[in-house]
Image (tube, rainbow, N blue to C red):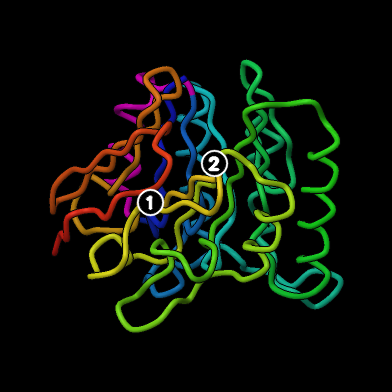
């Protein structure tokens, strides 16, 4: 299986165009949150309508999985927590989103909501517990924020990852976690697009300007993961026991 991971496109339509142009080359395309941009001039509801059209087109080309990110939380739910309610329209079009479990050729994908409070966080925990009862291997999570205290959550001076994700990884030991959120970690000394917690690989493609987004290509048959950016390309082997330090790339 060939998987394309992108995230944090932030209403950069040229980058969505690029994803659409290559989507058919992959068995699965994952967009791990932050489809919208709260700083954009375009109204959030208008952004959501445009992005939904892009998601529908991508869905026509390959298996598409999408999660929410913090920029996508445009409404309060009944608990007073922010939610990406607009993304439910993608599910109605047949696209797996937040809260969905998806089997692709024997690989179980679990798509997690970007939670905004204790109720949302508890729902993610319940989803992972349910998924853990299913017979599966491999098991891949889509989760917008990277785990804390990893190179994928390093911003140059401190870690800003999700500590709850660390606990869930330790408890359930998924094979891969596909993230985003921290734009600069692949480009900072001490940071990276890839790290490992026990046996779990964690990937965060980061973010860059221009028409081509930073992206990670995971090939489960070749057992490789490759990251591409304006600063260069790097690759790891998924059978490696540890993650070797990656050469520093400055964008």
**Badge count:** 2
Q: Position of residue 41 (x, y in %)?
A: 37, 72
Locate residue 80: give its quadrant: bottom right
What residue did someone put label 2 on? 176
Q: Residues within 10 Å of mark 1 (few under 14, many from 20)?
A: many
Give the spatial CA distance, label 2 vs label 1: 11 Å
Q: Residues within 10 Å of mark 2 (few under 14, many from 20)?
A: many
What residue did someone put label 1 on? 194
Look at 45% across and 63% down and name the residue there: 181
Q: Nearer the viewer, residue 217 or 90?
A: 217
Q: Nearer the viewer, residue 50 or 218?
A: 218
Q: Position of residue 118 (x, y in %)?
A: 80, 74
As for residue 142 lying within the magenta part, the answer is no
* Mark 2 secondary-structure assignment: strand
| Direction front: furthest residue | 241
Q: Is residue 86 left or right of residue 237?
A: right
Q: Is residue 8 left or right of residue 73?
A: left
* Mark 1 secondary-structure assignment: strand
Look at 38% across and 26% down and name the residue there: 23
Quadrant containing the C terminus is: bottom left
Q: Is residue 142 left or right of residue 20?
A: right
Q: Position of residue 137 (x, y in %)?
A: 66, 26
Magenta region: which residues? 12-27
């Amino acid at each position: 299986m060939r998987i394309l991971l992108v995230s944090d496109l932030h209403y950069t339509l040229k980058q969505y165009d690029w994803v659409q142009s290559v989507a058919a080359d992959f068995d699965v395309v994952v967009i791990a949150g932050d489809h919208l941009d709260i700083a954009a001039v375009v109204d959030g509801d208008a952004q959501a309508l445009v992005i939904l059209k892009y998601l529908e087109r991508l869905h026509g080309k390959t298996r598409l999985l999408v999660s929410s990110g913090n920029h996508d939380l445009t409404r309060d739910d009944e608990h007073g927590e922010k939610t990406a309610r607009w993304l439910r329209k993608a599910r109605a079009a047949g696209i797996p989103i937040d809260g969905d479990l998806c089997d692709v050729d024997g690989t179980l994908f679990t798509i997690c909501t970007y939670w905004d409070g204790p109720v949302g966080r508890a729902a993610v925990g319940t989803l992972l517990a349910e998924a853990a009862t299913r017979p599966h291997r491999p098991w891949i999570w889509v989760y917008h924020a990277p785990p804390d205290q990893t190179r994928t959550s390093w911003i140059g001076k401190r870690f800003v990852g999700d500590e709850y994700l660390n606990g869930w990884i330790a408890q359930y030991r998924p094979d891969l976690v596909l993230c985003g959120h921290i734009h600069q970690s692949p480009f900072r000394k001490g940071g990276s697009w890839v790290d490992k917690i026990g046996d779990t690989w964690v990937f965060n493609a980061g973010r860059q300007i221009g028409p081509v987004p930073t992206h990670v290509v995971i090939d489960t048959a070749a057992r490789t993961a490759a990251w591409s950016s304006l600063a260069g390309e790097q690759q790891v082997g998924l059978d490696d026991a540890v993650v070797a330090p990656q050469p520093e790339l400055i964008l």
